[in-house]
Image (tube, rainbow, N blue to C red):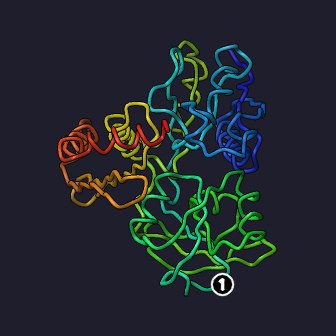
């Protein structure tokens, strides 16, 4: 049996790049494909911070519905946007090999402002909290929209800088391809009118699953799952599983400033993990670092989150939930 695999995606430039990457991989394996783009609420409602919208999976919900209704066969997402609990009937079919995990500060040419009062833009509570933890005298403002919209807003405002995911900038060809984990360095942002400069933030713990792309499918669609599973990267799957397990155990469905990164060390056959939970203002930071043999990976995220919860995390999560409600 052959069928055309309908690939659902958001219609932003980055989401379409991701969908086309999956399409090419499937085509190379001999499968027929078609891309179907839809707008999500997260792309349409740009005047409110994400946490205020109160919807889990605001960027994924529209595609979930399209898949359940049989309009598309798979959905391609940045994995960090996907809720840890998937809707009934939808499964993770593949996690692609991970790209750069780092966050990038984009600024207008010099970083003298780091030692003074400054304004930094980001739509992420995690980036906000980690930034304020390191630079408590700075102000953080909300920034929403697709990659090019956010770049334009940075250009048009008097902000000193804005924080972006390195993977997104690289995928759109706006930065040089940075070697994973290379650390802080400056580089020109390509093809942009204000000629901004990027700086890799190697001190900032990324979002769980940052830099990874995931493909979701319907659990009863064996043909599509068999096709897509050939794109799965096992190392990325394991590391993102650990990070998302940490997130799910801490969060319980609430948006919070949580960072997590798991790395596989091939030489020693170990997994290193670092995770943190911060208060919204960045003043409180609970963190954990662990190294375990590879065979202990399945509960690493869970046990790490439990340690954080038992060391003040429960109270901090309650404060965050309360603050976001008000």
Residue lying at the far front of the rendered structure = 326
Q: Position of residue 64 (x, y in %)?
A: 63, 24
Number of disc labels:
1
Residue lying at the far right of the rendered structure = 193
**Does 278 sit left or right of 189 as displayed?**
left
Q: Nearer the viewer, residue 118 or 81?
A: 118
Q: At 76% from the left edge and 39% from the top edge, which residue is drawn? A: 44
Q: Nearer the viewer, residue 50 or 98?
A: 50
Q: Position of residue 248 (x, y in %)?
A: 37, 34
Q: Is residue 250 above or below residue 138?
A: above
Does dot 1 land on a helix, a strand or a loop?
loop
Q: Quadrant of residue 213?
A: top right
Residue 76 visible in the displayed image:
yes
Q: At 74% from the left edge and 69% from the top edge, which residue is drawn? A: 157
Q: Which residue is mark 1?
A: 109
Q: Nearer the viewer, residue 121 or 175?
A: 121
Q: Residues within 10 Å of mark 1 (few under 14, many from 20)?
A: some
Q: Is residue 288 above or below residue 87?
A: below
Residue 35 visible in the displayed image:
no
Q: Quadrant of residue 147?
A: bottom right
Q: Nearer the viewer, residue 307 or 142?
A: 142
User: Looking at the figure, which quarter contains the N terminus?
Assistant: top right
**Does 40 sit left or right of 100 as displayed?**
right
**Does 140 sit left or right of 245 as displayed?**
right
Q: Position of residue 101 (x, y in %)?
A: 48, 58
Q: Position of residue 42 (x, y in %)?
A: 68, 39
Q: Is residue 41 above or below residue 179?
A: above
């Amino acid at each position: 049996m052959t069928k055309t695999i309908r690939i659902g995606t958001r219609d932003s430039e980055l989401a379409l790049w991701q969908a086309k990457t999956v399409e090419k991989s499937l085509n190379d394996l001999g499968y027929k494909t078609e891309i179907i783009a839809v707008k999500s609420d997260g792309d349409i409602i740009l005047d409110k911070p994400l946490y205020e919208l109160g919807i889990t999976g605001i960027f994924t919900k529209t595609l979930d519905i399209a898949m359940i209704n049989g309009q598309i066969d798979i959905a391609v997402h940045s994995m960090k946007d996907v809720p840890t609990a998937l809707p009934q009937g939808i499964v993770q079919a593949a996690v692609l090999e991970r790209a750069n995990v780092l966050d990038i500060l984009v600024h207008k040419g010099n970083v003298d402002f780091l030692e003074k009062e400054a304004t930094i833009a980001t739509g992420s509570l995690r980036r906000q909290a980690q930034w304020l933890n390191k630079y408590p005298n700075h102000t953080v403002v909300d920034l929403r929209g697709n990659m090019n919209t956010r770049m334009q807003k940075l250009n048009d405002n008097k902000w000193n800088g804005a924080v972006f995911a390195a993977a997104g900038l690289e995928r759109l060809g706006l930065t040089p391809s940075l070697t994973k984990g290379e650390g802080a360095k400056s580089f020109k942002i390509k093809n942009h009118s204000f000629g901004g400069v990027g700086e890799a933030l190697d001190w900032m713990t990324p979002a769980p699953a940052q830099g990874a792309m995931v493909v979701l499918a319907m659990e009863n669609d064996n043909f599509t799952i068999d096709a897509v599973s050939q794109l799965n990267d096992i190392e990325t799957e394991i590391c993102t599983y650990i990070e998302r397990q940490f997130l799910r155990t801490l969060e319980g469905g609430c948006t919070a400033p949580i960072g997590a990164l798991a790395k596989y060390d091939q030489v020693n056959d170990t997994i290193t993990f670092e995770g943190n939970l911060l208060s919204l203002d960045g003043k409180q930071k609970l963190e954990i670092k662990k190294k375990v043999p590879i065979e202990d990976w399945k509960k690493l995220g869970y046990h790490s989150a439990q340690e954080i919860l038992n060391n003040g995390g429960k109270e901090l999560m309650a404060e965050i939930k309360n603050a976001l409600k008000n």
